[in-house]
Amino acid sequence: MTTIRQFTCDDLFRITRMNLDPLTETYGLPFYLQYLAHWPEYFLLAESPSGDIMGYIMGKAEGSVARETWHGHVTCVTITPEYRRRGVAAKLMAILEEASDCKGCYFVDLFVRVSNRVAVVMYESFGYVVYRRVLDYYNGDPDEDAFDMRKAMSRDVELKSVVPLDKPVLSSEVE
Amino acid sequence: MALVTRTLTDVEERRLRPIYDALDQGNYKSAIQMSDRLYKKQKSMVVVKALKAVGLWRSGRQEDAMVLADEISATGPSDEPTLQALSICYRDMGRHDMIAIIYEAAVAKERTNEEYHSHLFMAYVRLHEYKKQQQTAMSLYKLRPKNPYYFWSVMSVVMQAVESLNVSEGSGDVAYNLYLPLAQRMAEKFVGRDGSATEQAESGPQLRLYIIILEMQRKFVAALNMIRRSSSRQSGGGVDFEPMFVATRVGDYLVRLGRWREAFAHFAGTLGGQPDDWPAWRGLVESALRGSGRSGATAAQSGAGSDRLGAQPGDSDVNGLGNIESDVTDAKSETETKSKSETETESTGETNATRDSQIGVNNAVDTDNHSEHVKPSDDQSDSYKGDSEETPKDSDKDLLEEVVSVVNDAIVAEECSRSHRLRGPYLARLLLAKEMSALGLPRSGQLASVEDLCLHYFHRFGGKPSCCRDLEPYLRGVENPERFLAEALDSVERVVVAERRYPADLANSRRHQGWLTMARRLGVHSRMGPEELLAVTRDLRAYYAEALRHGAGLLPTEVQHADGYLLLTVHVLLDLWETEPRRAKYLYHAIGILEAGIEKSSADFDLRLLLVRCYSRLGAANPAALHFRALDVKHILWDTIGYEMTSLLQPAGRYAVAWTRYTEIGKSSRGANRETAEQLALAYKAGNFAKILEIVELRRRLNRSLHYAKVHWEQKFLEVVLLSDDLEGLQDVEFIAPDWDLLRDNRDLSVLSDFGKLDVNRGSEEVAKLSFDMEVAWLRVRCFSMLLLNCGALLLTEGGRGAGEGALVNGTATPTRRLRGLLLHFEELLEDIRSNSSRLCCRLRIREPPESPLRLFLGFGHDELWLRAFSLLLASAELSLPGEPSAKASVNLTLIRDFLSALSEVCKRCEETEFIRTADDGELSIESDYLYNAALTIKYFGLHKSSRNMYPFGGKSCGTFR
């Protein structure tokens, strides 16, 4: 049971607990503002009845309709530890998917560390499939591969966007 | 650097391409060389010089870049590639004003160039030149009648309203009588007053802007009608607003208008589709209580997450739902003039007060007599209260019964469902019971007591880690904690292992941790003595050790399920330490437990933050900094939680590390204007007008950040006092004190969970205010210190000595005169702080925000030392002024004695504080105050290094602090 609403600039001062999580990246201010200015309907926040921020999702719509790559993209979804396993991520993802469907997207995609089994299983339970593996997508010591996971939207009637690729791709090949 | 080069010939573009590529790839030296070569061949291509300026700036040759860019600008270029290259150059330099200047010149030359007008508009956006924005957007619209241009102009008028509201109090008249009505009329040319978009109007963004304008004027009836009509059109296929936007807005407008029955129906309808929607439950309960005449219920106010309707940044009284009475003007208009047209309806809600305040304003406006323009104040709206809020009718009395029935039905439905996941109906029942109890309403047979409902909630959801947080607002309603806890514990299934009853599995372990937390919040630990508490810690550690097995398969990035036990153990130990602060063994013990816990749960930032606090209390800056570093704090987090680090390094004498950290944070803070400017332009392009308001407010909040201001001044102080070798550093300080009244507390003090007893601890808001006031007071002391140093340094130069008493040099006061004034103000400031010392210098608990150095500054006599030192300096300077020499000499001797006495007092108090103390049982403890005081003292001794003439005692170098 949550309050789901659009993320506001002021909320940037309240995301500290979530962003202290080791898998949640803290981006520079322009990065957040770019999403807020451009895709506010894709930047949502879940708030608990007691006023805690439970989590947020940040995404965008991009690609080309002509090439059938017009899609929703989940840049980040994070839930604070005490509010995990309560279906908050599922709700946020569902709203983003609904928005993508309304925009006529072919699919929604996201990238996740291959080592993050918990997240991979969670996305699978939301209907996402591993479309391809992207080599050395995450910088670090050492670099780490990502799974590019996708879920087809209603526009992709033939589910062409989610047919998995046979071979991994280089991160430089990812648009 | 994606520059458009369409006015270039193909050949020219081919020649320029390598330069663009070099700049894009960061090969600035190569870009400069190529620019030079190309310019020699083709001197008519001014763009080459502009690109060279970009290369020069980015390669660090900033002076050369500025000269070159200004040189090109002075020629008034009007070709697009040059203008764009110059724009990028000036953007890099942060000189947004120059972008406006070059495009003003370009527009003057090419009046019909749409693109140049557009760039000029964006240039004004970056400069926050709202009036010029408005004019440029309108010129643009006249040139090319496109809707977005027109609405850029409307938004520019709205921004003028916002700006006038922020300039000073009482400037609202201009906003409410001039700008907002004007913006409304402008918008209505495209958006019909009946809520329909006219033929020219596109949809979403423009309609949303219209709604923003209505909300800012509190015209909720109009906004409500508009959204309803728009959404009814949507059902025919339009996409003006998302369903979430419609549901939230309609509910909030109805509550603000006091149309309780309608609101009740709306929320009930929303819950029919989304039975776990908390704002809808909150709205339902509030509308039922208020609608049945049980006013005073503040369900919505007590809840969180209410959308900020009509809230414009900085306008605090329009936030939340606290001003329902003042929001009813529209309602009154509506009820009184039902037969009239809506235009008339909007204009009938004015009061005498509003009419008065309009006199003289309407003359200046091209008004069409839509006169309901003055924001109703609370006073004015009182007179509306009876008329405007729906008077409860008999049927409304049933709302109470209805709400109980809706809540209970939802619970029955949930109990019958298979998911068993919805918490909303259960929390709504708790909220209803709590509010009814607060209002003294008799409990119906359908509703149990708050205590029983808490118990039921715990039985049902106790296995979730957030259960305790959910229950927190209601735990105060538990009248018999012993009974409550005993019955709650029954729902924790436990098994006996080695004579101790452990939770049977992970779910029961979570439930058990929740129960223990509730017990602590209900004061169980605060009623125990030290021995009992120590026994509790032993139990908790045993539970922890046993529960670790549940997390055996967790990834390193996950938090251990057993950490709740560990956190409770540490909090109990910290309780013990705070009752006996001279015995550090509890603190050491807590640190040991936390360090061991981090080994098993490195992702648990709660453990790390507690470690930072514990080490900080010991003055152990290195390990504290190490753990803080592991949190990977950066960007905006420096402003929200950076205080944990910055409050610790300098007081502990870690000057070099502090300086590095300050530099890092400074980069984040200084970028606010630059970083928001481009995104503002983007929001205009995307038509997201609500975000424009938010970004402007964000920029203001960052620029007024208390923490950033503190970092700025502490760094200056460090540079000047400790890291500089001569007086120049002291003289060159640019002193622009913050506007104290406007400072904002951007710290997120809720990051570290509160585990104290509910009604014993200071409330979090009270602590936040106290800590904020302490920090501001310290910052004022620090700023004055810098001013005094700066003035003292000037005094010691020839110019300072030469200037006579009362003289002005080039219209500014001489250093002697300034110092005298400063000392007076410094003394007043210290007096003010001393008179509030019981509050401003009190000791904060370890789980409260870190203290500022103010307590030690005053407690160890540094305030007196500063005053005496600068009084002496002033008197020495005055010796050179005309007057009776013998009298001055005698005054000076007294001042020297005073100074030495203050100095010896600081040293004496330092000596009296034991750094390492040995208790009777041989236990060693450290007094961190000693360390912090020593660091404060060393700083002042360090002064002589850079300004040895300033102190009469001269002295040796204090060593290097790098």
Image (cartoon, coloured by chain):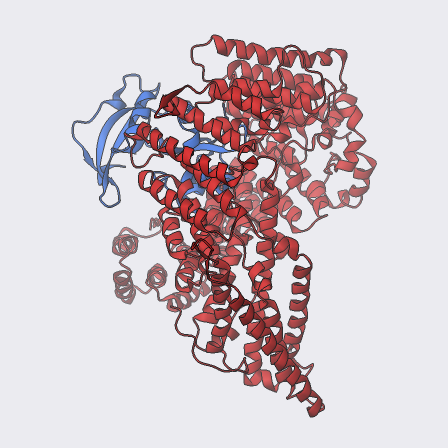
A159 left or right of B502? left
Point out residue B881 in the picture as x, y percentages from the top left corner: 67, 88
Q: Colour of chain A?
A: blue
- State the residue lying farthest toward the left: A167
Q: Is residue A1 visible?
A: yes
Task: Identify the residue at horizontal 64%, vertical 87% (top origin).
Answer: B879
Task: Identify the residue at horizontal 39%, vertical 22% (top origin).
Answer: B507
- State the residue lying farthest toward the top: B416
Q: Nearer the viewer, residue B132 or B300?
A: B300
Point out residue B465 in the picture as x, y percentages from the top left corner: 44, 28
Q: Nearer the viewer, residue B693 or B314?
A: B314
Q: Colour of chain B?
A: red
User: Is B436 above or below relative to B611?
Assistant: above
User: Is B910 above or below relative to B181?
Assistant: below
B780 left or right of B755? right
Q: Nearer the viewer, residue B507 or B776?
A: B507
Q: Quadrant of residue B216?
A: top right
B121 left or right of A86? right
Point out residue B285 in the picture as x, y percentages from the top left corner: 63, 20
Q: Is residue B465 visible?
A: no
Label count reads 0
Q: Quadrant of residue A151?
A: top left
Point out residue B420 in the picture as x, y percentages from the top left corner: 45, 14
Quarter in which the C terminus of chain B is drawn: bottom left
User: Is B733 above or below relative to B462?
Assistant: below
Q: Nearer the viewer, residue B579 or A38?
A: B579
